Image (cartoon, coloured by chain):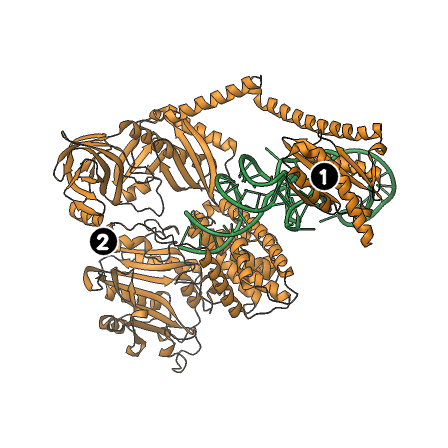
Chain colours: A orange, B green
RNA sequence: GGGGGUGUAGCUCAGUUGGGAGAGCGCGGGCUUUGCAAGCCUGAGGUCAGGGGUUCGAACCCCCUCACCUCCA
């Protein structure tokens, strides 16, 4: 029985624990009870690609619970950094509105991996709460799963009074990791934080898992007891485990006697700092107070994410982070009037507050500031274009009238204009809509918009059943391709055609072969699959590709050229060696490139995808701006230096933990086995990698980056070539430069300046020609004087001329001069060029109502077999029948005369 | 991976069924002047992102490419 030494009557604490002390106390408590203190895993979940962020203390122990992974301890305790944003756990929009919703929080927990079970878990929990944290027993409530008599009994034995132990159904008190796998009942501790705990009308059972937040859950103890199989049956686990979780912020609120997590010393200084930046006091129950809480919470999520290598971007977890950041920035701008970048100062405050327990924050301090600031600037630009578009949209409807929801939603979808901003702008125009209704209609419109454009692309190839069956029956294919590219005496263990296993493949057929051992590398880790041949004395097959549809099962896609292959046949497998060597070069070069990128650009560079093919390599990585020419040159130089060193490439198989300890680069979100292969280029690069590599770096030959592009915001892609490909490229470049130099009659090193000079000369010459032509055309007019050319057509002065020396724009300029001389009248100009003729008609302003230039051109252009049009004072047209230009020009007198007469008759 | 959008002077952006490439700021020169982003006059500065097509004619319409923004998986 756990006794409650701290008497409940003295609710006022002797001295209040800080958040840091509460965390430390928790961890030390369990350390003293045989638990190993395990550091928080990064927010980027290693070993679990299905998870956007670490979101529970047990994440990093998942494989330990399922028995896949073994650790040298059976008891652990941790404070885990978690982010929950969106999804079923937490709606981003709730953060700041309630006392306890957060994007970022810390989860305290103790874990037993098949060691102790319910009894100890319950005793420890109660002991810690009552005797260390000194919580009064009469404020505590306990819940158990409805049929878990064992737990209920244990709580009472430990000191709880029986009426304080409540039973709940599966929704509240049964936990499972997924649809299958370990699961079990859980037990929660709740805390009554209202006044007068002795009054049973106030501190009552209905409040547990009930309405309001007088009573809140503070600790969840999960008893992993069963294994759920696909058909839903539960089998008891041989070694039941314990997984508990207590939110640090909640615990702090309880221990510090405040009702809101935002009033604990973990968050309040950030809220106050936001208030200080805004220059106004924090009033909890106000719009401004809400904004300050949002900023405080989101600043923590932001700082911790960036420190763990998650940067704002437009996909996956990066996108979630961007949403979080922008939400904070928006609220700061809008509710608090913080127009200039401010958020990076709040995140910096987070670094200051949390760098003690989380030194990674201090290490990334400058990076955090830079990234946050640049996101603030980018978002500022997005906001102002969004506002402009919104203004433009509002201008299309009468004042005070509601625009189409679909148009508003389009604004959000296309320009990222926050919906709050849209709603508020509407309000400023006197259109007020209840927030709920607005959100609902907005969502509808948005859904409609996105459904209209969405196509069902989810044709993700399910792993064919045949592979799963084969993998189960055959186990892992032994891969011999590290040592050699040729293997005699391999045995065919399965053949597949289409979706089915077959007994044999015959000449002319395509299908798949599985061997017991193979030198063929299956596509993995970005490296493409090998090609080559598989032969027996009587038959040949060409290997077109090699894949591993199920981990460990190597499948050769083949076309049988001669004879037949049956199960049990002994074959010789020969990989296309030249191609494989090219792949080796590119793969090792990829590692060198990765290391060089980190050295030149910074440690924030992380691999985001890669492709290793025989003719090139492609590498995607996180970086927030295009590479400069100097950076590219520096990277190339570094990589080539390593190649010239010609050091032997080493591979080693070791346990994952040891590899990570030795500083090997691993990919987050990638699944690794317990024993991993580590590839080292001594003194430069160390990475986990299953691919095939060169023996020494010198084998790679020349290395050259040929492309740098953006693949998404925050992610860049470079492509490079090595070996013979690079040499071919250099030769092409050389040829190109030589051809240019000889064409331009200059030395190669003077090419840029020669071209620049040529361009300048060309520009000047063009301008000069233009001026001269114009002068010539207009000058002709002064010499001969316009008088002889001008004819009177029904009272309108008309000047017609062919000027084929001028281009279209020269024609317009000449018409200016001539029309000015004419003062009142019509100018018709024609020109011939490139087998076409064009016409231009100008009418002086005073005649605009009498003769329309467009009308004239519409009558003249058909003569040339074309069309024309324009404005009343200027019109252009033309047609392909250039030989009829004179005819058209002559016809213009009659046309204008007719129009002039019609007009005067009407006038 | 998919949808939507943008790209015009150094910067911020206009540009009307397709018919003369513009404004403000900045920059050069001149004038005026001691007053708060000084005023007036004047000038330079453009591959309308790149390529192809339609057309008598394309910044504008169609197709491809690139860069950037944005929403979603």
Left or right, A141 with respect to A779, comes to: left
Residue A497 visible in the displayed image: yes
Please report, as a chain letter, where disc 2 is located.
Answer: A
Q: Quadrant of the C terminus of chain A?
A: bottom right
Q: Nearer the viewer, residue A276 or A723?
A: A723
Residue at 48% across, 29% down: A633
Both marks 1 and 2 on one chain: yes
Most foreground residue, A693 or A793: A793
Displayed quadrant of residue A112: bottom left
Q: Position of residue A139 (x, y in %)?
A: 37, 74
Provide the residue designation for mark 2: A67
Disc 1 and disc 2: Cα gap in Å?
86 Å
Disc number placed over residue A269 in the picture, else none: none
The chain that hosts pointer 1 is A
Look at the image and tell me in which quarter the N terminus of chain A lies.
bottom left
Q: Sequence order check: which comes first, mark 1 or mark 2?
A: 2
Q: Position of residue A576 (x, y in %)?
A: 26, 29
- Residue, x 36% and y 76% (percent of image)? A138
**Relative image position of residue A780 (x, y in whole percent):** 80, 28
Circle 1 SS class: strand
Residues A855 and A207: in front is A855
Near mark 2 (Cα within 10 A), the count class, few <14, some 14-19 or many ≥20, is few
Going by the image, does A826 lie left or right of A859? Answer: right
Residues at circles 1 and 2 in contact by the CB criterion of under 8 Å: no
SS for callout 2: loop
Residue A675 visible in the current orientation: no
Q: In this rendering, would A248 be left or right of A161?
A: right
Label annotation for residue A840: 1
Residue at 84% x, 30% y is A782
**Picture coordinates of residue A443 (x, y %)?**
48, 64
């Amino acid at each position: 029985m756990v006794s409650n030494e701290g008497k409940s009557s003295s609710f006022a604490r002797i001295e209040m624990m800080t958040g840091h002390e509460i965390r430390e106390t928790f961890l030390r408590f369990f350390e003293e009870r045989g638990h190993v203190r395990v550091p928080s895993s990064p927010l980027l979940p290693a070993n679990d690609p299905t998870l956007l962020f670490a979101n529970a203390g047990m994440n990093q122990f998942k494989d330990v619970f399922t028995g896949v992974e073994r650790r040298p301890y059976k008891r652990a305790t941790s404070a885990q950094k978690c982010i929950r944003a969106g999804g079923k756990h937490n709606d981003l929009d709730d953060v700041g509105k309630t006392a306890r919703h957060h994007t970022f929080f810390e989860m305290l927990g103790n874990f037993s991996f098949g060691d102790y079970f319910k009894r100890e878990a319950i005793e420890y929990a109660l002991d810690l709460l009552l005797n260390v944290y000194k919580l009064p027993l009469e404020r505590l409530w306990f819940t158990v799963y409805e049929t878990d008599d064992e737990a209920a009994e244990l709580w009472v034995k430990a000191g709880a009074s029986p009426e304080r132990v409540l039973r709940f159904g599966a929704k509240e008190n049964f936990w499972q990791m997924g649809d299958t796998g370990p699961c079990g009942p859980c037990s929660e501790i709740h805390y009554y934080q209202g006044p007068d705990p002795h009054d049973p009308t106030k501190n009552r059972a209905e409040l547990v898992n009930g309405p309001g937040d007088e009573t809140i859950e503070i600790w969840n103890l999960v008893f992993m007891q069963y294994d759920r199989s696909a058909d839903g049956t539960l089998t008891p686990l041989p070694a039941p485990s314990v997984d508990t979780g207590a939110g640090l912020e909640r615990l702090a609120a309880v221990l510090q006697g405040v009702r809101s997590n935002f009033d604990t010393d973990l968050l309040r200084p950030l809220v106050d700092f936001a208030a200080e930046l805004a220059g106004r006091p924090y009033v909890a129950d106000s719009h401004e107070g809400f904004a300050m809480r949002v900023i405080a919470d989101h600043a923590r999520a932001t700082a911790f994410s960036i420190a763990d290598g998650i940067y704002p971007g437009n996909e996956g977890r990066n996108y979630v982070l961007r949403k979080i950041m922008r939400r904070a920035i928006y609220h700061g701008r809008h509710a608090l009037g913080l127009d200039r970048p401010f958020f990076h100062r709040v995140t910096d405050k987070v670094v200051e507050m949390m760098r003690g327990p989380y030194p990674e924050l201090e290490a990334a301090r400058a990076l955090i500031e830079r990234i946050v600031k640049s996101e603030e600037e980018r978002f500022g630009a997005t906001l102002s274009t969004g506002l402009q578009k919104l203004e433009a949209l509002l201008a299309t409807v009468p004042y005070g009238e509601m625009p189409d929801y679909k148009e508003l939603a389009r604004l959000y979808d296309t320009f990222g204009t926050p919906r709050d901003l849209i709603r508020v702008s509407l309000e400023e125009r006197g259109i007020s809509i209840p927030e709920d209704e607005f959100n609902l209609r907005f969502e509808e419109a948005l859904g409609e918009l996105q459904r209209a454009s969405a196509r069902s692309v989810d044709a993700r190839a399910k792993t064919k059943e045949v592979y799963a069956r084969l993998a189960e029956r055959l186990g892992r294919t032994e891969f011999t391709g590290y040592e050699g590219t040729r293997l005699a005496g391999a045995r065919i263990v399965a053949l597949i055609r289409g979706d089915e296993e077959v007994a044999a493949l015959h000449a002319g057929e395509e299908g798949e072969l599985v061997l017991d051992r193979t030198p063929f590398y299956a596509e993995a880790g970005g490296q493409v699959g090998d090609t080559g041949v598989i032969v027996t004395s009587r038959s040949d097959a060409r290997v077109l590709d090699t894949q591993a549809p199920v981990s460990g099962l190597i499948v050769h896609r083949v076309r049988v050229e001669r004879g037949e292959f049956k199960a049990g046949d002994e074959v010789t497998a020969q990989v296309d060696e030249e191609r494989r060597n090219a792949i080796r070069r590119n793969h090792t070069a990829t590692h060198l490139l990765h290391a060089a990128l980190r050295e030149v650009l910074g440690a924030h560079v992380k691999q985001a995808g890669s492709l290793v093919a025989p003719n090139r390599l492609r590498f995607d990585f996180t970086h927030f701006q295009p590479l400069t020419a100097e950076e590219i040159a520096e990277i190339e130089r570094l990589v080539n230096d390593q190649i010239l060193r010609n050091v032997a490439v080493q591979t080693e198989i070791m346990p994952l933990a040891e590899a990570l300890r030795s500083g090997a680069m691993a990919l987050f979100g990638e699944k690794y086995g317990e024993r991993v292969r580590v590839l080292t280029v001594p003194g430069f690069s160390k990475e986990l990698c299953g691919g095939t590599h060169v023996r020494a770096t010198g084998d790679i030959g020349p290395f050259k980056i040929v492309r740098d592009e953006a693949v998404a915001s925050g992610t860049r892609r470079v492509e490079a070539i090595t070996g013979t490909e690079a040499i071919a490229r250099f030769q092409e470049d050389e040829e190109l430069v030589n051809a240019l130099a000889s064409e331009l009659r200059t030395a190669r090193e003077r090419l840029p300046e020669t071209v620049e000079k040529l361009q300048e000369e060309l520009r000047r010459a063009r301008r000069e020609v233009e001026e001269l032509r114009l002068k010539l055309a207009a000058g002709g007019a002064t010499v001969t004087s316009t008088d002889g050319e001008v004819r009177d057509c029904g009272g309108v002065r008309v000047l017609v001329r062919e000027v084929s020396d001028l281009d279209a724009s020269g024609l317009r300029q000449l018409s200016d001069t001539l029309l000015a001389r004419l003062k009142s009248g019509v100018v018709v100009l024609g020109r011939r060029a490139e087998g076409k003729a064009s016409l231009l008609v100008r009418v002086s302003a005073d005649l605009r109502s009498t003769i329309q230039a467009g009308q004239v051109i519409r009558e003249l252009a058909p003569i040339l077999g074309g069309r024309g049009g324009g404005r009343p004072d200027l019109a252009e047209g033309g047609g392909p029948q250039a030989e009829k230009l004179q005819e058209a020009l002559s016809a213009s007198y009659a046309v204008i005369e007719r129009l002039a007469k019609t007009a005067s008759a009407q006038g």
